[in-house]
Image: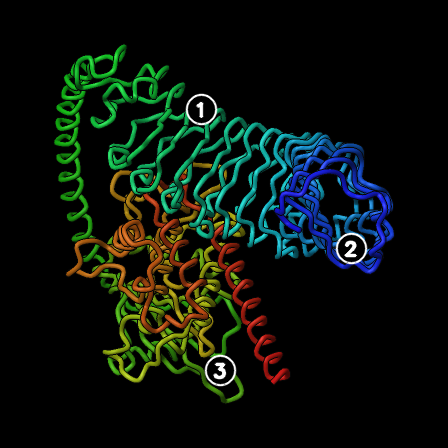
Amino acid sequence: MFNNGLTGEISSSVTAVNLVELDVSSNNLTGSIPDDFGKLINLTLLFLYTNQLHGSIPPSIGLLPNLRDIRLFGNMLTGSLPPELGKHSPLVNLEVCDNNLSGELPADLCFNRKLNDIIVFNNNFSGKLPESLDGCYLLNNLMLYNNHFTGEFTKSIWSVVTNQLTTVMIQNNNFSGTFPTQLPWNFSRLEMSNNRFSGPIPTLAGKMKVSRAVNNLLSGQIPWDLTGISQVEELDLSGNQINGSIPMAIGVLKLKALNLSGNQISGTIPAAFGFMSELTILDLSSNALSGEIPKDINKLNLNFLNLSMNHLTGEIPISLQNEAYEQSFLFNPGLCVSLNNSIPNFPICGARANTNNGISRRLIALFFVLASIMLVGLAVRGFLLLKRKKNSQDPLSWKLTQFHALHFTEYDVLSGLCEQNWIGSGRSGKVYRICVVDGEGGSRMVAVKKIWNAQNLDNKLEKDFLAEVQILGEIRHTNIVKLLCCISSSEAELLVYEYMENGSLDRWLHQRDRVGSLAPLDWPTRLQIAIDSARGLCYMHHDSSPAIVHCDVKSANILLDPEFRAKIADFGLARILLKTGDPASISAIGGTFGYMAPEYGYRLKVNENVDVYSFGVVLLELTTGRVANDGGLEYCLAEWAWRQYQEYGLSIDLLDEDIRDPANIEDAFAVFTLGVICTGGQPSVRPSMKDVLYALLRFEHKSRERSLQHAVSEETSLLES
């Protein structure tokens, strides 16, 4: 009898006691719900929605043993819900929104743990949520907004165990509490504005479309890890206590609306905003942002822009210098315009330009002075090296310093330094594979790195050698190549490492055609290599005291054992960062083109962020199969990946052909996007290696869950057939 134009009241006498389903929704019924409905013990479905019913819901309805679906929304019902609703039946769906109901939700509402939907918005409910929701693992939609609920929000709702949950709309209540670090993966909509939630912002869910958390007490920084939420279209975190900077990774999102106003966000506006082609609403007002407005914002088709009440400086982008944006830049005294009267009350930028020209001339003069000093320094250095060469004719005197128990001597190593054992050259020396004694008559292979002959050794290479010895000799970690000993003399320096049978990652990714007979690495192996390498770097950055910066992370410096477990190698460029002092100077650090972070070119100091950038390039190599820098390409791999992602999104064409199995694509896309984030231009917004490792482990965990579900599904299908 749905939508049949029925009028009048429902009969108070019910005789069809065997009724299973009752649907008289979308009519013009008046009056109250009869008490006799409590006699319908076989009733599974009760639909009375969109009528003009009033009065209370009979308590006897809560005693019906088979009731699964009750929909009473869109009426004028008052009073409370039946106190035993959900306790005596396998209740799946409750929809009573748009009424005048009050009181608390029934204590046993999810007693039988079958409930999928709780939709009670636009009422006058109050009090705390029932404890029975803690076990509501099948919950799919929770819509409690526009009520008067109080107390701490049920923490189990956020549990990743509740994989069914997709929608939580709890705005305009008085909930409090904090969030877990990770929201359930299936979340597509989270609206929690105008409550009292506090603590840091969680990592959003992978399927999130809309997230609104306006006017709460959220604090901390915006999570850097935005790799898994590329589907989000609207993000509103305005009116909180968020600080820190805006992550560069914001540019990978396909947002249509972003509102971060009314917080304490500092730093600059990322240039990555220019790549957010679908963005139409941007509000960053009432923060502490500084620096210039990125010119790439010109590319956006914004319907609304508000950058007012910040500390922005420089020229407003030309395309924004018109009356449409007259209110967009207020209370930024450092901003100026190039077009007279384009935006009222902003100064012309010309005067500042003249000042900048004067500064530029002074910088040029300073450059020539510094260049002259460097030339004199090089001349003096050359003289000292020549003098050293003449005085270095002492007889060879070898000294072995061991860091692990050894069964071979320095002479076992020296006798193997011949061309037939040569396997390659590094930046500062040749590498040999030598067979040595390994106790009780056995033997083992070791890798020996020979620093160039000491007669040609300059101070820079000496520092390389000392750095490797000092750092590697003290390190004990599964994912860092083991330095067994060093052998030194006045004319040569040797480093003896454990031998890694499968060579470098570079060899397996980029030299298969040249080497021949190498099978392509499958995706699980590549992901494990990424995790192993991240563990090694994470130890260096976060668990070593003092911290260590590698400064030359690349696929050629990631070595593989017989089981393809990865270890970080070649610390010739490593620098120790004293936690209590400034980061080390990079005056003598080289790095490898294609892996070097952009700050190498203009900063006198480096920190762990340069390794994060380089590792991001390695992640891009693992997922795309491309080399870090190909002389024939217009862009290096990091820039190519960024441009491809912005233009085409996560296209399967991005991935290496050897890992395009449908079972791998989701994980490969996630790792690719993580690589894009790690190679961001701003060092301060790159994730730490601890964050990167956490993300990779999360990808691996999800991959295993999917594999297990697939296996169970296949086995079930076989049993059913």
Sequence-wise, which precedes: disc 2 or disc 1?
2
- Checking the image for residue 438, the label placed there is 3
Q: Give the farthest residue toward the bottom.
A: 441
- Quarter of the image that includes the C terminus: bottom right
Residue at 49% across, 87% down: 442
The residue nearer to you, when weighing 18 against 91, is 18
Q: Can residue 155 be seen in this view?
A: no
Q: Mark 1 points at which residue?
A: 287
Count neighbours of disc 1 (C-alpha within 10 A) and say few if under 14, some if 14 to 19, many if 20 or more: many
Q: Is residue 701 left or right of residue 625?
A: right
Q: Where is residue 123 in the image (x, y as percent from the top left)?
A: 69, 32
Task: Describe the element under mark 3 as helix, strand or loop.
Answer: loop
Q: Is 317 above or below relative to 271? A: above
Q: Which mark is residue 67?
A: 2
Residue type, mark 1 in image: Asn
Question: Disc 3 marks which amino acid?
Answer: Asp
Q: Where is residue 387 in the image (x, y as percent from the top left)?
A: 18, 52
Residue ID at (33%, 56%): 617
Q: Which mark is first along the chain, 3 or 2?
A: 2
Front residue of 558 and 169: 169
Secondary structure category for the residue under label 2: loop
Residue 276 shows in the view:
yes
